[in-house]
Image (cartoon, rainbow, N blue to C red):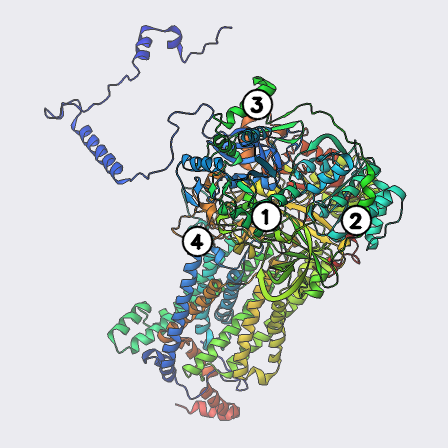
Amino acid sequence: MAQKKYWKGLEELENTPEHQQIVENEFQQELPVLGDVSDKLLGAETPRRDFLKFLGFSTLAATVAASCEMPVRKAIPYAIKPEDITPGVANFYASSFVDNGDYAAVVVKTREGRPIMVEGNELSSVTHGVVSARVIASTLSLYDKARLRQPLVKGNPVDTFEAVDTPIKQALAGAGGAVYLLTGTVLSPTTKVVIEQFRSKYPNARHIQYDPVSYNGLALANDATFGRNAIPSYHFEKARTIFSLGADFLGTWLAPNEFNHGYNLNRKISAKNPDMSKHYQVEAMMSMTGSNADERATCKPSEYGKVAAALYQAVVSGAAPKTGSDKLNKLISSAAKELKNNGLVVCGSNDVNVQIIVNAINNAIGAYGNTISWGATSNYKQGNDKEFVAFVDAMNAGQVGAVFIHGVNPSYDYLDAEKFNSGLSKVGLSVSFAERLDETAEKCQYVVPDHHWLESWGDAEPKSGHYSFIQPTIAPLFKTRAFQDSLLTWAGITDTYHTIFNAYWVGKLGQSAFDKALQDGIIVTEAPVASGSFSGAAVDGAIAAVNAYKGNTDGQYEVLIYESVAIGYGGSHSNNPWLLEMPDPVTRATWDNYICMSYKTAKEKFESELTLHNQVDHKKRVLKVTVNNKEVELPVVVLPGMHNDVIAIAVGYGRSKNVGRAAADLGKNVYHFGQYTGTTFLNYNVGTVALTSAFYPVAITQTHHSYEGREIIQEFTLDEFKKDPNFLLNKRKKELGHYTTLHWEGHHDEHGEDKSSAGEQALKHDKDFEKNGTLYPVHEKHGIKWGMSIDLNACTGCGACVIACQAENNISVVGKDRVLVAQEMSWIRIDRYFSGNPDDPDTIQTIYQPMLCQHCDNAPCENVCPVSATNHSDEGLNQMAYNRCIGTKYCANNCPYKVRHFNWFDWNGADSFADNLYQDGRRDDINDDITRMVLNPDVTVRSRGVMEKCSFCVQRLQAGKLAAKMEGRPLKDTDVQVACQKACAGDCITFGNVNDTESKIYKERYEENSERLFYVLEYLHVLPNISYLSKIRNTDAIVAKDKEQDVFQVKNL
Amino acid sequence: MHLKYESFVREPLITGDKTYAQVTEDICKPIEQKPSKLWYVGFVLSLLFLGFGVFSVFWEVYWGLGTWGINRTVGWGWDITNFVWWVGIGHAGTLISAILLLFRQGWRTGVNRAAEAMTIFAVMCAGQFPIFHMGRVWNAFYVLPLPNTRGPLWPNFNSALLWDVFAISTYFTVSLLFWYSGLVPDFATIRDRAKTKLRKRLYGLASFGWTGTAKNWQRFEALSLVLAGLSTPLVLSVHTIVSFDFATSVIPGWHATIFPPYFVAGAVFSGFAMVQTLLILVRKIYKMEDYITLGHIEAMNKVIVLTGSIVGVAYLTELFMAWYSQVHFEQEAFKYRVFGPYWWAYWAMMTCNVVSPQFFWFKKLRRNIVFTFILSIVVNIGMWFERFVIIVTTLANDFLPSSWTYYSPTWPELGFYLGTFGLFFTCFFLFSKYFPVIAIAEIKFTLKVSGDKYKRDMQRLDAMTTEEFLEEANHAH
């Protein structure tokens, strides 16, 4: 088709010769050029006046040029632009987070070659896009200043790999004893190939896998009952009844990134489909998973076996359970009945006998083949406790010639670390691949640091047949080497790991399929379908064994050690300031580990009663815990829902100085409180607790536990919801009906039933209240109006959103001292409220409510700012102009949600004052030049003295709008996903354009879930743009509604 | 002026045998003498406090507001508490000088000068807090509606904080003018008595060439009336606007329509208490017992008991309204205010502000100098707690229990507060040394009507029969 031609004028159309000349000669007037000035000044080409002009100009220009010293910046321009990088445009790479057995399929966002954000890969058939806070925070660990920057020989840095390779090879050749390769669980098939190649060179080499938090009991029980030393797949998505016996499967147990997705599918509920799973939890401490359970009771960790046995009897024969407490008995018998409806029983114990009984229950309720499958095994944890203990013995006996340690840190996390250390000192050659000088690496002769996973090639097989790839997103920052390459070098093999990796996968998939798999990050191949047939031979023995277990006696406590949701087992996470400052989902404490103790025990035995007047006091009494003559002194944090005879302490703290500045000597290590049964490691023990006279401050972000029956939370039982789904809607209409309808317009819907659908009623209510609840005219909101909906039913409190927000929006870490005085910065927080009787841990109900800027359309913060620094966008965003803010804090005071955060200090060097950077000696590496590479260049780093708060990730909104605009179409939901929404494991955050009736947010509010819709503090007429969906509990009663039962409320706790 | 007869039943406002000359002599003497040792001690102490305050503020501005104890929930602590407190203290001066002038209350002449000075110094102290409570104080000028190149970008006229800027600056300006215009004739008096050249020159400059002509006096009177007229609404408006900082918010415990009258009454209450504190000291130190009499003190104590009771009623009304409103959040806010973690502050306020002034129903206590002095301090402690209770306890326990915190001040906040005391007393010591602490000209207006000596003369005349009086009057010349 001929191009349409436009012309600028008739001259161009006619194309006269004059016009052609004009076109050719672009500059029609002669340029005044400085000519010969010596002769006849006025007649010269440049007359005198022009000369003076030039003189003036050049003098001025010279002055300016000479006086403005150009600052030297360290930016390197893309003189030769890399093919795939456009400055300002992010690149995304599919990869996999693998930390020993911890696994998630991820997408890594890189900007100008720097990975700055990790998000879930929704293509994954295993994790379905779920990532934990730890996964997201791993970008910060990549830029950790404490990482090793080159190999070490006996603690001294060396500049070349030859300097380590040569002596190691020599030592290996002359190793007088067995060669051991000690790793965490290896998920990578190609790494296993490499290990085999290494072993073919050194036939006496053995590979031992060790998990600091062991799941060996699970595999051994399966060995006993199914003849398979492995862990099957758990299908929470199929489970309608879940019974968890001490398994924190949403937070830390086995594979929370996998389980969250399936679990939450069954927690979604609407009036059209008023059905949800039922979750029973019996546990010793208050875990995050337990806090989400519908029915919860406590028992001591030593009683897990008895509870399992009771449940087994109840399931098999209907026998009435006879455990310690009535609540527990009731819970077991009701669970026994319901478990037959697609039930699933999981247990956090690592005791083989307990797991055998659990297998028997699962078999009895028909879980195998339904909610549990042997079709694919879960490979997350393959550690073998017995082998490891034998290895430690072998070291001590001097039978080990060389040991190579990758990914694990037994000097820190083995329950008898001293024995391991003494053994290690007897080994002829000890090599660590640790990325930092951790407790074990310190004691090794050579440290050859491995890459961070964001710098590596690799793969993983988290479940058999489900493969996942790791690809580097940045060139290695330091002189590190893939540990596989190190092994290959020392085995004298010239291939690199990358060639082996490539050959393996191209061989397996073919080049094009491999390329696609690498791009997708995952591939699922047909796994050999295997099933196990249950053999109950071991069950009776196991029941007899667990019934013989003895727990604590009077005056003693069972001491449980647990992984916290943020830090986990330790590793590099221990030194991650984001994770250290992330409030624990249940205790809301940061920066420390502590003794979790029940309210009653703390009050009666340890002078630590919680009252309205002392709950705000951060000074906590220090107690001394003694187990097997090993003492640890830690502060006590009262945690409702703890069993009265149990105390719980998180692992992952108490690290050595070299692990990093943030982790150094923070809290205490309690791994040594575990025990070894002769077959497996257990995570509890019996000990005594004694009062000391000391106090220690614990930085807790939320000190009040009850929501005091305030209408800020709406929760109902499933039966209530089924019976009257419109209850909440009607309540809202009743409360505010007076303001939604003007009296001269008649109260038409106060009398008689409103026949319109709930969605229409909700929409009308919202519109009418906006318009008629005020004296002022209403702003019409055309175009885009951003809104968010948060489903309280799906929020598990995991905190992934908190870390995602921190990573996305460059939120400052403030350090413990500042958290202590409530000067933290987190834009999104998860409020956690308890109800029930603190004296009785079995009555506690917990609710989580994510709280962030509500982007009120009638925002109280906006009208009080004297300088209009916070104002409203025409898209419904409550926005901050940091440059304009003078920091009166009036907006924060007037915010009913208290979601505004002030830059109390110069947290990050963005201040214009010299030398006033805030430093506390612990968090300061966050401002290191390397660590600052984690900052998102799209988001301003706020300076001291200004207010900040959630922006609804305005940079993402802008990018989404631009993407839609470039494609010339209206914005769609998929264009924009805010950071917290993307990170939410429960998919509880819906975000989008409320004005678009096709958007998910509109549908959720006004079509699908209007019955559960509510706004926090709606009556204030601040018109928040964030709505919540009520919490529905699959239980008999909401404790918080019964003032008699909710002692928290009565006592104002 | 004051051509009125005053019954001898009324207490004299000036005791002793005073003539015009003696009045001038008494009031000017401290200015013309070397100050006492006590003065030097007090002045140096004040300077030390001021210095510590400057250091505290420097520390805060340099490191950031995190050096204060305020936090994500309680965004205002001692800063705004002290601001409101100081502004409140200022109120008595304006009330005395403006409203009492309009009502022709003769007794005001004994105390108005010092009270006005106190107003000005208190407002100066108050002003420091909103300025230095800003996170970026170097951008404080953003609040001014100056023409600018940023858009132009104007301040937000909806913000009560901006209204404060205007209210306080207007108040300060008018008070300063009022005070200074009253000082002009007195400066002229000192100038005329001056024995050193420097003093003559400086006071000459300060008195703007006052010659004491009838025209001078006429204009002086007119200006006084105009300024009194301007100041009178300010007495009510300034603290009303300060109360809007809270009343226009949405926070339960702040959002209350009772705040304006309640704040004004509280301000007058605390202001008079502060005047008492200062004048009891001044009359003692400068031996002004003849001019600031027990009658003055009693009159002010009556104001204190009145306003204290108004404030008490306001407290009870708040509680009643919280219950009566049936608004859950409102009720809870007051529950935590009274019984929550800050219960001690609430009860300190109640004791100091409501219970203690009731002693002034007894005349004996009203006229007891020591008791008055102690109580005046107690009242100001109470009024400080009132502001603390309103600001801090309200914020500490607001809508969402998850964000409740506890606020305790840190040393820079304490230092800042002490620093404003330093500023106040530095100014006050300079004032008492270099300025006439009693309005010479004005007190002379009342001398021949309410002076002790003249009243005693009047007593003799009063006792006469009409005939005798006529006789004497006719034969007087």
- Cβ atoms at labels 2 and 4 below 8 Å apart: no
Q: CA distance from mark 2 to mark 4?
A: 71 Å
For residue B418, above or below residue A45: below
Q: Position of residue B198 (x, y in %)?
A: 26, 72
- Cβ atoms at labels 2 and 3 below 8 Å apart: no
Q: Chain of mark 2?
A: A
Q: CA distance from mark 1 to mark 2?
A: 28 Å
Name the residue beneath numbered marker 2.
A545
Q: Chain of mark 3?
A: A
Q: Chain of mark 4?
A: B
Q: Position of residue B222 (x, y in %)?
A: 43, 66
The residue type indicated by label 3 comes to Tyr
Tell us which disc is closer to us: 2 or 4: 2
10 Å neighbourhood of mark 3: few (<14), some, or many (≥20)? some
The residue type indicated by label 1 comes to Asp
Q: Quadrant of residue B454?
A: bottom left
Evaluate whether label 2 is on the same chain as label 4. Answer: no
Q: Quadrant of the C terminus of chain A?
A: bottom right
Q: Chain of mark 1?
A: A
Name the residue beneath numbered marker 1.
A413
Residue A504 - label: 3
